[in-house]
Image (cartoon, helix red, strand yellow):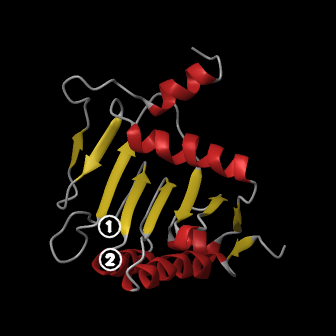
Amino acid sequence: MKTLYQSPFTLHKRVLDGIDGEIAHAQAGKPAKIIAKMNSLVEPQVIQALYRASAAGVDIDLIVRGTCALRPQVAGLSENIRVRSIIGRLLEHSRVYYFLNGGKEDVLISSADWMGRNFFSRIETATPVRDPALKARVMGEGLHLALADNVKAWQMDGDGNYRRIAPADGEQAQGLQETLLREFGCL
């Protein structure tokens, strides 16, 4: 219970503390990065914290399958934030939060989207992944493959519109879901 973050008690604060930690690293001239994967992002305090992080120079990649109230790539607000959505044959429900944390790499797996109801009106949890091999696997399968997807991924612009990402000329097609299905012998 000492490492489990829970809604409605400690999870929202943990997410905000993670973002604030990256802001502090960026302001100290250190590398700062956030990657988060979820289904929805609509909680106003988290969105405002992400905007502050972008302004401080934190590099932010968000993988949000559904509703996203944050607007990325807006001059003076969110230049350092990218939002992508992956729509494939499988309905994914993984939630992974990554904070570079001065090179310590905090990786949390969770049941919670970044929504008011998940932070304040439900029982939700997040827990850090501490084992190095498991952390690498969660990062690889949960985040890096999603960021490399150029088959089913869509990138949001500052107006909230999405454009389909496609392989560049000569670039190999990489799909998150297809890669995992092949890896686990399902294709």
Q: Which picture quadrant has residue 25?
A: bottom left
Q: How many marks?
A: 2
Q: Which residue is mark 2?
A: 51
Q: Nearer the viewer, residue 29 or 116?
A: 29
Q: Residues within 10 Å of mark 2 (few under 14, many from 20)?
A: many
The residue positioned 71% from the left and 47% from the top of the image is 134
Residue 173's x, y, as percent? Answer: 34, 24
What element does badge 1 sit on?
Answer: loop
Q: Is residue 148 above or below residue 143?
A: above
Q: Which mark lies nearer to you, 1 or 2?
A: 2
Numbered label attached to residue 86:
none
Q: Which residue shows up at 61% across the image and 78% down it?
A: 14
Which dot marks residue 70?
1
Crowding near the residue tagged with mark 1, few <14, some 14–19, many ≥20 C-alpha atoms within 10 Å: many
Q: Amino acid at mark 2?
A: Tyr
Kindly identify the residue that appears in the image at 59 percent across and 82 percent down: 13
Spatial CA distance of label 1 from label 2 is 9 Å
Please say if 131 is above or below 78. above
